[in-house]
């Protein structure tokens, strides 16, 4: 990073981003690949949001939560990818101090919100399968709105704490003071972001599995498993890299490996969500075909 000084004091003005490669040709190839991934992620998640808004049959709590998840994914990937695309082609590889912290806060807050939100989606599946006659009563629009607003508020509030303590560190080549406090804050947030939500999701699916196994007819049982399959797939691909990044011991830290895992965590997971839900969900596919037919008739 670069520093500016005044008298005997100095402060960081910008950080230098190392990137993936110093070779311009490689960077141009990476730019094209990441641009396609970014556009696919935004368009795929945007398609889900559009279909849910347009089709009245999708105005249920499950698809309301799916719409929120897609918005979170679009926000998360847009926080980092445009900046990365710029730096792959630009001469300057720097980012301002304020820009770095804003990006870190937004990415972390959205990630924490999504982690908590998966618990809400698991609760939705739990109610749908364990209490089907009361599903619409329990998950009223009022409760759905409060659950969604609560996850956003928790995610953005708790990550303020991490950002506040990290910004207070003095930087002189590296953070040049005792970092035990920020390490403790990181541990608490890691537990709150990974361990606690994952435990609640596992508990929900244990109850769901018990309820499904009590169903005697094979067709309803398969349908119940199918309802949960998409959510379980997305949860697995979200929490597997997150667990490695935030819970692993310091002795296994590797900057290059972290780049690859973070890229998968930020880009491919976001791209996976619309692929899973569009391909596996009959209601989403039906809504898509309906929109396509309407567009064709309009022409």
Image (tube, rainbow, N blue to C red):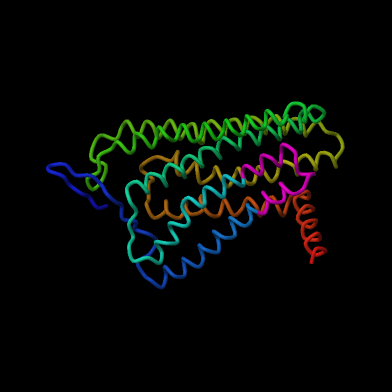
- Out of 255 and 124, give the one closest to the viewer: 124
Instruction: Indicate whether 292 appears above or below 225.
Output: below
Q: Quadrant of the C terminus?
A: bottom right
Residue reaching furthest to the front: 298
Q: Quadrant of residue 175?
A: top left
In this picture, residue 63 sits left or right of residue 83:
right
Q: Quadrant of residue 249?
A: top left
- Out of 173 and 223, give the one closest to the viewer: 173
Residue at left offset 55%, top offset 64%: 36
x%, y% of residue 131?
Answer: 78, 28
Residue at left offset 38%, top offset 31%: 185
x%, y% of residue 76?
Answer: 52, 48
In this picture, residue 75 sits left or right of residue 258:
right
Prevailing SS of the magenta stretch = helix
x%, y% of residue 150?
Answer: 57, 30
Q: Does the magenta stretch include residue 30?
A: no
In this picture, residue 19 sits left or right of residue 134:
left
- Out of 264 and 291, give the one closest to the viewer: 291
Residue at left offset 59%, top offset 60%: 40
Q: From which residue to which does the magenta span run?
A: 47-69
Q: Does the magenta stretch include residue 63?
A: yes
Residue at left offset 77%, top offset 34%: 212
């Amino acid at each position: 990073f670069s520093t500016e000084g005044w008298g005997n004091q100095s402060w960081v003005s910008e950080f230098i981003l190392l990137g993936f490669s110093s070779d311009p040709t490689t960077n141009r190839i990476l730019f094209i690949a990441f641009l396609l991934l970014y556009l696919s992620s935004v368009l795929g998640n945007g398609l889900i949001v559009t279909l849910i808004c347009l089709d009245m049959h999708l105005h249920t709590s499950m698809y309301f939560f799916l719409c929120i998840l897609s918005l979170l994914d679009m926000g998360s990937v847009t926080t980092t990818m445009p900046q990365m695309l710029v730096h792959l082609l630009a001469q300057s590889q720097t980012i301002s101090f304020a820009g770095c912290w804003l990006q870190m806060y937004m990415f972390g807050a959205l990630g924490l919100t999504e982690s908590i939100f998966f618990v809400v989606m698991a609760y939705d599946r739990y109610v749908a399968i364990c209490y089907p006659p009361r599903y619409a009563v329990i998950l009223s629009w009022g409760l759905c709105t409060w659950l969604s607003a609560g996850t956003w508020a928790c995610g953005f509030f708790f990550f303020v704490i991490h950002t506040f303590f990290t910004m207070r560190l003095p930087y002189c080549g590296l953070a040049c003071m005792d970092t035990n406090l920020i390490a403790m804050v990181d541990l608490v947030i890691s537990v709150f972001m990974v361990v606690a939500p994952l435990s609640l999701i596992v508990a929900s699916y244990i109850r769901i599995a018990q309820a499904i196994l009590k169903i005697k007819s094979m067709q309803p049982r398969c349908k119940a498993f199918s309802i949960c399959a998409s959510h379980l797939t997305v949860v697995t691909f979200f929490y597997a890299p997150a667990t490695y990044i935030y819970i692993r011991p310091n002795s296994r830290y590797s900057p290059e490996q972290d780049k690859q895992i973070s890229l998968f965590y930020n880009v491919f997971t976001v791209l996976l969500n619309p692929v899973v839900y569009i391909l596996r969900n009959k209601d989403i596919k039906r809504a898509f075909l309906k929109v396509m037919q309407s567009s064709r008739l309009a022409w």
